[in-house]
Every structure is written in structure tokens, then in C-alpha cells.
Amino acid sequence: MSQSEEFIWEVEDNKNALKNLKDMEITVSNKTSEHCESFYEDDVKQSYSDEDNEDQCEDPLDNSADDVKVTVFQGEYNEVDFINEVNEDEPILPRHAVIHSRNKRSKTYPSEFISPNGRIWSISNASIKTIVPTDLSFLKLMPKGKGPAAKVKNVLEAWCLLLDERIIATILQYTNEKIHSFKGKLSYQRRTDVVELRAWIGLNYLCGIFRNTAYPGPLNELWTWELGNSIFRATMSWKRFEFLASCISFAAPNNKRGALQCVMLVQDVWERFLANCRSYYAPSGNCIVRDTVINANDNARLTVLCDAKSMYFCNAIISNQMETKAIRERIVLHLVTDIKGSNRNIVLNEEYTSAILAQKLKHRELTLTGALSNESEDVPHALLENETKYKLYSDIGCLISYTATTETPEFLLTTITPGVVAIEQLYKSTNQSWDHLEHVIAAFSTKNAGSETFNNGALNLFYRVMDYAAINAWILLKLSTSGLSSAPTHREFQRDLGLYLTQMHLKRQLHDKNKLTLPQKLQISEVLGEPTDKLLADACEVVKKGTARGFVPTDQLQLPDGLILRTRELERRKRCCICIKYQTRTRCQQCLRAYCHRHLIVRCNDCMGVTELPDP
């Protein structure tokens, strides 16, 4: 049997898998019409340089969550689009050396190409050493929540799995320490608590919703009566919101300097958040690794591993932009630690793709699909001089030439056996998913709540944490078997999340009788959707008591003969004998006990019959 027939026979073996996958996709289309717009681990220390202990890491995917029913999920793409019913390689396989034509001269093509690093590429697929199964198994893996995440019922429950009580307690501790060191004496410079801190985070989410224009105005406009929203004024004042943003802290201050200083200041919160994200989710069979900038003013770069189908934030590493090629390989190998041995596919860009990395991923039972630039050492120079579309094979996989958005030819390196899977379509759809994720984050980012008056690198990283927490929680709710029948859009989810986080703080203020005025309490009641009849009735009673005229019979007047009235002013402030809560400088002129103006009856000299007040 020839090599061509072996390859075609291998494709024929996959037709049953192709038919089963299409039947599954038809079921998906019948059960859901939603289109996913975009997107939890034990305490694991993030260190991409520790490859020696990689084999000792427990895979969070291997747990009892496999028995949980997986919710049908449409996602960013349809897996059927990546399947070729006809073998792509059939027109290319006969081109070993010469192509004959009756009307034209025979054209001779080389059967082998040599790249600058010495790797030999052949037009024959006989050199492929298959380590990873080349069937459609990675396309059958669907995303799912694990553990408690598989049964979340509402917005707040899903979010609290990611930014849990331990993270909130850490932020609360160091924030109060900074507020205490500030020693402010104004009313809005007081210490905070868990309820108010959650409300502050909720307002950040709402700022991402209401301040997502290309040219937003000043942030404090959201607190104004003319252009603002009542939820901001009812939750806290603008000065209080800005003060908490300036005092928010995630660790004890240190004197270390460097490009990754923001990571040092938020390390505990960051590691705990990554642990939660990795623990509560199992990605689909196609994942993507990309870079994003945390802050344009420093060199810190965030490299993330996302599920290309749901855009769930699976894992991440913060590193310096000035890194070597070997460090980039270790970054990718660390990010895929949780999914090794699962036959999943990893999509990379030109910066990370290499034949060496493809070989390492194959030994971890993972496939690679990535772009190679024309300057890559894995691309033979002879291909750059020829506009013919080639498909070459080596011991590490297949090299495909294709035309991207520009006229310059580019190349795709894949360890998936081509012909069964449309590699170019797979790479294109995955990149579109990443672009969609970046668009959603930019549109509703909590960074819109950042103040222009100060620049805090650690706070910028926490803004990104809040963004990923909202996206991941949204995906978990959509995947939940106990979730809503009709899942909300990302904007609706983030809006509801902001309202839920501020709700407890609003209710506490509403029941605090001496903190807010009647208009403020009416405003909070309207935000919470509670009736205002009781508030108005209580206010009327207070007004009636304040304006009531008392009647004292003559026989009950306690005015002994020869009464000497002292001055009403005290030398120093004392607490009122009745309400105790307030301190006052006034007292009764007869018994000389301290009373505030609420419990002291004031009468003039003529009504009392006093002709002259004695000296104190």
C-alpha cells in the first residue's frame, strides 16, 4: 500500500467520527440559538520557570466533576466549520517531482526543502511521527463548570466563587491599614468594611456600563443630578468613592522597584484569583495563548490562556516584555499545565510558535496550531521565492503556506494532521474569538472607573482582575445546569452584578435612621424597588412631634417659690441625659442637667416672669 493510500485510508477511518460530531452539532443548533459574546484551583504559586515539578502537578480537570451534566453551549464558533469532508491533501500528494501538461512545458518542483535551522520539510507526509491522535477528539471536548460552579443559580453566586471572601478580606485588611496611616479627619476618610467594599466594587462595574463611550466626560458626572445616575449618589458620595480608590491596597507597602512592582503589590490576590479560575472550569478542546498590556506606562505584560470557544480566562502569567525565546516557551508550557494529556489544541501567534515548542507540546499530548513569520528559522527560504501554495511535512507536523490579510505570504505550523481539519479556518476563527474578547473588555471595562488624578499600577491590574471575574462568572452561569433558562448578555450580567453588590450597602443605609436625609432614603428605596409609604408616614410623624404644642396644667407646674435660675450655657460639652448620643453645651436652668435642644424647653424671661438673671 502506498503512502498516499495510507493517508486516504486514515481519513476514511475518521468519517464515522465526523458523522457523530455533525449529529451533535445539529442537536446544539436545535437546543440553543444563543451566540456567546465572550467568556476557576488550589493555592498554586505562579512560577513559569519551574518546569522540573511540572509532572508532579495535579491536574484540576481530573476530579468527580466529570459526572456532571454538561450544558449545551454554542460558543464563538461551530466545530463543523473546521471539518473537511474531502481530503485537502489529494491535489497535493501526487506532486512529487514533475507535473506534465499537454500544452505547456513540464514544471519541476523540489520534493524537499531545508529551513535555516536545518529541518527538512518534504511534500510527502511519510515523515510525520504521530504522537497525538489525529482524529476529531479535541473538537468533541465541550466547556463545563466544575464543582460548585456547575450548579450556580444567580449572578452573585457565580462571581463569589472567583473573588471569594478570602480575597475580599485581604483587600479590606490592607485598605484599612492605609486609611489608618492617612489619619484623615473628614467624614469621607473613615475606615471601611466588607459591605461597603463590595459596594465600591459594584460601582466600578456600573461605571464600566455607563461610561463606555469613546470620549467619556469626567467621572464625577455620574454623581450629578443633571447627568448622573441615582445608584451612584445613593450608594456613596463621589468624594468617598474617589478616596477608597486612592486607598485601595492589596499587600503591605514595600520599597521594591521594577517593571513587575504592580504584581508584587497584588500578588496574594492575583494568585488566589488564578487558583479559583482554574479550579471551577474545564475548557473546550481549542485554547488560545495571547498577550495583553496591563499598563501602557510600564513593561509588564500579561500572557493569558483562554478557551477559544467561550473566551473563559483559564490561566495567566505576568512577565517582562524584554524576555527571551526560551522564556516564552516556558511561559506556554506553564500555562498548559492543567490541560496536558488531554489532546487539546493550542493556538499561538508568531511570537510564540516554533518547531521546538511544537515538539514539547506533542510530548505532553497537546497539539499546536500557530503562525510563523517569514523571518522564522523554521520556514525554508525557497518558499519565500515561490508563490505556489505548499503543504510540507516534517517529523513535528505540517507547514502550510497561506495568504493572510496582507499580500505577503505567511505560514501556519500545526501538529494536527491536515486534511481532516481545516487548519486555516481553525486559526482564523480562534483569532476572531480573541478579538471579540478584547472588544468586550474594552467596552465594559472597570478601568472606566479609574480617576485621572492618579496612576496606580496595582489598581490597574485589579481592574483587569474584576473584568475577567465578571466574564468568567458570566460563562459559568451560562454553563450551569441550574442556571437561568435564558442567559443574559454580558452587559446585562455586569449591570445586575453591580446592582447586587451595592444592594446590601443600600439596605443598611436605609435602616440607619440618623445617617441620611429623607430625600436620600426615598432615592434608595426607589433604587431597591421598595415601597416608600412607610418612610413618608414616619417622616410625617416626626414633623408632627416637632411642631406639636404642649399643654401643662397650672397645678402640675414645678416652680417652687424663690426659684433661682442659672445660666443655660455649660463650660464644656456634656452628653444629653435622655438621648446620650449627642453632646451639648446647654442645660436646664433649674436642675442644671445637660439636655440637648431636642429635649430642652426654651421660654423667654417675660413668659417666665423673671425680672433679672443672677450671675453664674
Image (cartoon, rainbow, N blue to C red):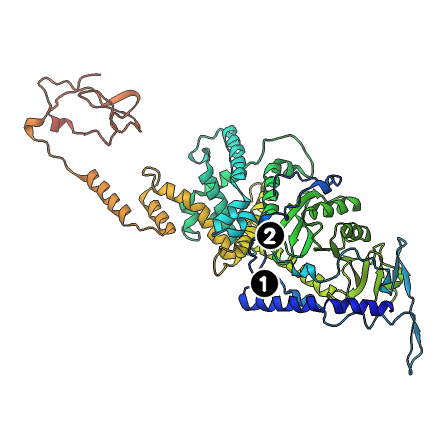
Instruction: Please state which amino acid type lies under the numbered disc 1.
Output: Gln
Callout 1 touching callout 2 (CB < 8 Å): no
Quadrant of the image containing the N terminus: bottom right
Left or right? Give the position of 570 relative to 340.
left
Residue reaching furthest to the left:
555
From the top left corner, tell me how far across and down residue 150 is, in percent: 54, 52
Local secondary structure at mark 1: loop
Q: Which of the 4 quarters of the picture holds residue 370?
A: bottom right
Q: Is mark 2 on a helix, strand or loop?
A: helix
Q: Determine crowd level at label 2: few under 14, some 14-19, many 20+ residues with C-alpha closer than 10 A.
A: some
Q: Mark 2 points at which residue?
A: 66
Disc 2 residue type (three-letter): Asp
Does residue 303 appear left or right of residue 391 in this picture?
Answer: left
Image quarter for residue 114? bottom right
As rendered, which of 199 and 361 lies closer to the eye?
Answer: 361
* C-alpha separation, residue under disc 1 versus residue under disc 2: 20 Å
Nearest to the observer: residue 609 or residue 176: 176
Q: Can you say whether 421 is above or below 567 in the image?
A: below
Marked residue nearer the N-terminal end (1 or 2): 2
Question: Where residue 365 sits in the image (x, y, percent)?
Answer: 74, 52
In this view, 209 is above or below 597: below
Give the mark count. 2
- Please indicate, yes or no, whether residue 217 appears anywhere in the rendered image: no
**Rendering coords of residue 442 (x, y %):** 59, 54
In the picture, the disc for residue 426 is: none
Q: Nearer the viewer, residue 7 or 521?
A: 7
Q: Which residue: 45% across, 33% down?
A: 190
Above or below: residue 140 compared with residue 162: below
* Residue under numbered circle 1: 74
